[in-house]
Image (cartoon, grey):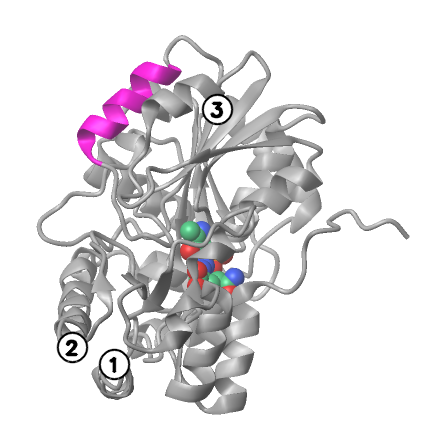
Amino acid sequence: LTSRLPHVGTTIFTVMSALASETQAVNLGQGFPDFECDPSLVDAVTLAMQAGHNQYPPMPGVPALREAMAAKMQALYGLSVNPNTEITVTAGATQAILTAILAVVHPGDEVIVLEPCYDSYVPNIELAGGVVVRVPLTPGTFRPDFDLLAAAITPRTRALIINSPHNPSGTAWTDAEMQKLQSLLAPTDVLLISDEVYEHMVFDGLQHQSAARYSGLAARAFVISSFGKTYHVTGWKIGTVVAPASLMAEFRKVHQFNVFTVNTPMQHALAAYMANPAPYLGLSAFYQRKRDLFRGGLASTRFKLLPSEGTYFQCVSIANLAVPERDLPEGEFCQWLTREIGVAAIPLSAFYGDGFDQKVIRFCFAKRDDTLLEALQRLGRL
Ligand code: PMP
Ligand code: GLN
């Protein structure tokens, strides 16, 4: 058998979590909370099951959840969304991204990704038979370079994938950057896949600049969210995609033969839970406090802190550490850090097709304070 994905192995997140558990290291690698979600959200699932919501929901998702999402898109981003034709509930952002790509990318179409990028994008494009076009974010700052982006757009460009707030760098696109993107795409037919799973984690008073806020972007975009990130339930694998009706019709053609539907009781639970905006409106402050706790502890080490404007990730440079292992490739350094120092992290090289090594690693701070303090104590030895 010839592999469809010859370059793909096991994801770095799975590899590092397995190593962390084998070595009993503090796992700041794979991005997920080590604390529980709001118990009332769990109660809402039980209630939904007891109320008999245990059979297939409608293919695009439970109406109450689509209506709640439409109301939220209007309230937060000023986008008027028809819940019947413009929202679909997906099995997490992962499925939304793959399904969007399969729905619009024909073999030979070019799809632009901005590197470093989340690890599923490139294999997803390859599965669709698309041609991956990699445009680097500016080294050091991870900000978009619009000259490079403009140069990458050709008549064969079908779509561009963006991700703000950005995994792994923690940068969040500004209004000016979104405006530039809107102007750049205006004369083209390029579609936009906007991965916004960290939309409710932006710090220091910054605002999340959803593609939904920009009419020229929203008209060509799949805007993708994840309840897993927003409500501390990454294992639930449930999210949404919002797109104009014409794009959504194509999306649903694939979705119905991909998963068909997403589990019913959790959709009812989330619809009920979304009636209270406080949990998502308070999420930035919740994570900003954790970010500051973690950054405060790292400030007295030789790790050089990069900005973290959003997400639950903090990147650091290892270039100035006193230990000789700082000269190892990032991936080997992370293995050493896990085994010998007892803290797992993710090498940024894993987010580049060519394994670009800039001596930067990523920590996840979506952890209990005692977990973060334990990690800081161990990292303080470096
Ligand atoms: N996109 C990005 C940038 C992510 O960090 C993640 C979570 N790892 C996903 C998509 C996938 O989200 P989900 O768990 O909802 O599938
Ligand atoms: N998105 C998470 C991260 O970046 C991990 C998700 C996964 O394991 N695929 O760490």
Disc 1: residue Cβ within 8 A of ligand 2's nearest atom: no
Which residue bears the numbered disc 3?
191
Residue at (32, 52) in percent of width and height? 169
State left or right for residue 191 relative to residue 318.
right
Q: Which mark is residue 382?
A: none
Which residue bears the numbered disc 2?
297
Residue at (48, 24) in percent of width and height? 191
Instruction: Work out how far the residue at label 2 is from the one at label 3, CA to CA, in angstroms.
Output: 42 Å
Residue 27: % across, % down:
40, 79
Tag 1: amino acid: Leu
Instruction: Work out how far the residue at label 1 is from the one at label 3, CA to CA, in angstroms.
Output: 40 Å
> What secondary structure prevails in the magenta region?
helix
Q: Secondary structure at mark 2?
A: helix
Q: Nearer the viewer, mark 1 or mark 3?
A: 1
Which residue bears the numbered disc 1?
372
Q: Secondary structure at mark 1?
A: helix
